[in-house]
Amino acid sequence: MAFQQKRNDKIDSKINKVNSSGDNNLKRNLKGTLPLLALLTAFPPLSTDMILPALPSLAETWGVSLSVINLTLICFFVTYGFFLLFYGPISDRFGRRRPLLFGLAVYVAASLLCVFASSASMLIGLRILQAAGAAASSSISMAMTKDIFSGQEREKILAYIAVIMALAPMLAPVIGGWVLADFSWPWIFFIQAVLGLIGLIGVLRFPETLPKVSDTPLTRVMHTYSRLLFNPSYIVMVLVMSASLFPLYSYIAGSSDIYINGFGMTEQKYSYFFAFNAMALMVGSFSCLRLTRSIRSKHLMTVGFAGIFLGGIFLLFTGQHGPWSFALPMFLITFSLGLSRPPSNNLVLEQVDRDAGSASSLLIFCYFTLGAVGMWFISLEWADKIPVLGAIALGCGAVVLATWIVLQRRGIRGTA
């Protein structure tokens, strides 16, 4: 505790020096800090969910199966997770701004190139490049919260960011549906390029948040992961939190087929149902923000994991009866994720005292790697995806809830 307090005091001192030189006060000027951090963490849902309404029509236009078109999602997630492993330690070595600016520049360029894709394979390749750039934003933005904030303050900031960034998956498919109603799918990627450019300008105007860069040689910069892999409390928490998100990523890949081909909805109506589910994430995160004032975070996490399990039961046995019978259990699952995710992320970061960039990268890498597995699994040629999705939520909810109860009894760091 003394070491952590000393480290926090050192960070605050460094930040104050930055502020005295003319930069904004990072801890007080939340009006500028929060929107930028939220935008940077929102690139993955913006990049995946905005194109979802167009997937069935793209499969028909290019004469390929929906499972092939879903590779634009799966390959994006795999590449995204892979590059996360590099951006985190590099940001610890050279600071946050330079790798973040590089990644955003790649993202903007790749998004513009996606506008001109003329085949499924070409779009898949460009999405891989787009993911390589987008990976810089999530891991480094989470590391920035570790640089600027600490303890309960950081948990509160993560909850604020979760509320704001939940708007991205809620609005992204609606925007995509509107674009498809009046224009064509390439405009979706043009909009993504514009959003990436806004993020790039924001980072250019933002000061460096890392007080002191690592002096580790570049050839050994990836060795920070070995320390994390031998940190059992960190690894266990990462796996638990990653497994809790497995049902959501399966839903993202399977929802367009379920609503458009299964329930016979138009692309625009599907986008509203997807937005309804995404709203659950925002409501859950906002509820977490309010409830942490009177309820301990570990109890909110328990309720959230139990909600995933309960939603899986409802989805498995009632989800096939109609669009709302499917949407309401998914709302419960996603709300529960929103409720538990801010304290979960904070608890993971509590397990490390240094290498915050690497810790954030490995955390989000596991999120997206398991997410890609979920997307692949739900994209298989199932006769009916709804009971499969229900079984996924039920199984993951049970495993995560049981593991979390055991971890609390063993007194994992940050749960006392």
Image (cartoon, rainbow, N blue to C red):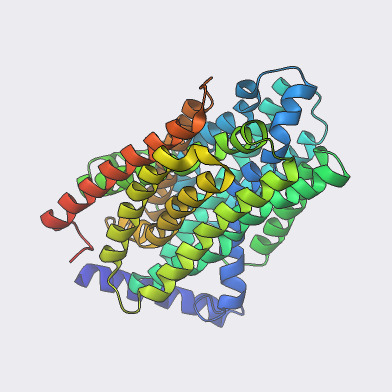
> Which residue is at a point 38% across and 41% down the rendered structure image?
393
* Residue 268 in the image: above or below residue 356: above
Q: Position of residue 104 (x, y in %)?
A: 66, 49
Q: Extreme left residue here?
A: 410
Q: Position of residue 317 (x, y in %)?
A: 40, 39
Is any part of residue 242 visible from this angle? no
Relative side of 61 to 414, left or right: right
Residue closer to the observer: 303 or 236? 303
Q: Position of residue 403 (x, y in %)?
A: 21, 46
Q: Position of residue 273 (x, y in %)?
A: 62, 49
Residue closer to the observer: 307 or 238? 307
> Which residue is at a point 40% across and 45% down the rendered structure image?
314
Relative side of 191 to 324, left or right: right
* Residue 83 in the image: above or below residue 340: above
> Which residue is at a point 28% across and 45% down the rendered structure image?
400
Is any part of residue 181 visible from this angle? yes
Q: Quadrant of the C terminus?
A: bottom left
> Which residue is at a point 67% across and 56% down the rendered structure image?
171
Residue closer to the observer: 264 or 330? 264
Relative side of 191 to 395, left or right: right
Q: Quadrant of the N terminus?
A: bottom left
Q: Extreme front residue here?
A: 321
Residue 148, quarter of picture: bottom left
